[in-house]
Amino acid sequence: QVQLVESGGDSVQAGGSLRLSCAASVYTVSRYSIYCMAWFRQAPGKEREGVAVIDRDGSTSYADSVKGRFTISRDNAKKTLYLQMNSLKPEDTSMYYCAARLGACKRSEDEYNYWGQGTQVTVSS
C-alpha cells in the first residue's frame, strides 16, 4: 500500500508564500509505479476541488484559480511531491490533500486510489 504524508501547511498573510510537501512511502504497487500525483483542496462547507496534477514525466495541469501562482513538482528519487504556492489569497484557505494513482492523471477525485490526511493552509487578509 502507498501511504502519503503531507507537510508544510501554515497560517500566512495574503501575498505570502508556502511550500507543501507530500512524501510517499513507496512508489510501486505490485509491478506498477505511481504515475500521477495531484493536489486537491477542500474549504469548510465546500466540495473538494483539484488544484494541480503532475505525471511521472513532469507534465502538469492547473486549476484556473491557481494558474500563474502555484507550481506543482515532484522528485521521483525522493518519492516526494511539492506544491509551491505564491501570491496567496484568502480564498486559498483550505485543507490541502495529496493524492496518487497508478494510471494517467484524471480530474475527478474519485479516480485517485491513495490519499494523505491533509495539511491546513490559512491565508488572512
Image (cartoon, rainbow, N blue to C red):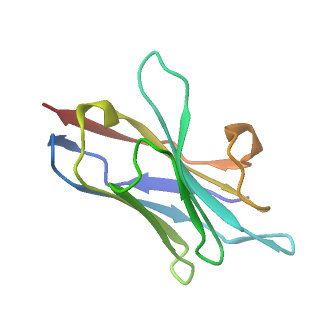
104 relative to 115 in the view: left or right? right
In the rendered view, tell whether residue 75 sits above or below residue 10: below
In the rendered view, tell whether residue 107 sits above or below residue 90: below
Q: Residue at x 55, y 74 (%)?
A: 79
Task: Tell how many labels.
Answer: 0
In the rendered view, tell whether residue 81 sits above or below residue 58: above
Q: At which x and y percent is residue 104? A: 76, 61
Front one among 42 and 90: 90
67 relative to 111 in the view: left or right? left
In the rendered view, tell whether residue 68 sits above or below residue 108: below
**Quarter assignment of residue 88:** top left
Q: At which x and y percent is residue 52? A: 52, 53
Seen as rendered, the residue at the extreme top is: 45
Q: Is residue 102 visible?
A: yes
Seen as rendered, the residue at the extreme right is: 31
Q: Quadrant of the N terminus?
A: bottom right
Seen as rendered, the residue at the extreme bottom is: 77
42 relative to 28 in the view: left or right? left
**Quarter assignment of residue 12:** top left
Q: Quadrant of the C terminus?
A: top left
Q: At which x and y percent is residue 28? A: 74, 72
Q: Residue at x 41, y 41 (%)?
A: 65
Q: Residue at x 56, y 56 (%)?
A: 4
Q: At which x and y percent is residue 78? A: 51, 79
Q: Is residue 93 visible?
A: no
Q: Residue at x 61, y 60 (%)?
A: 37
109 relative to 118 in the view: left or right? right
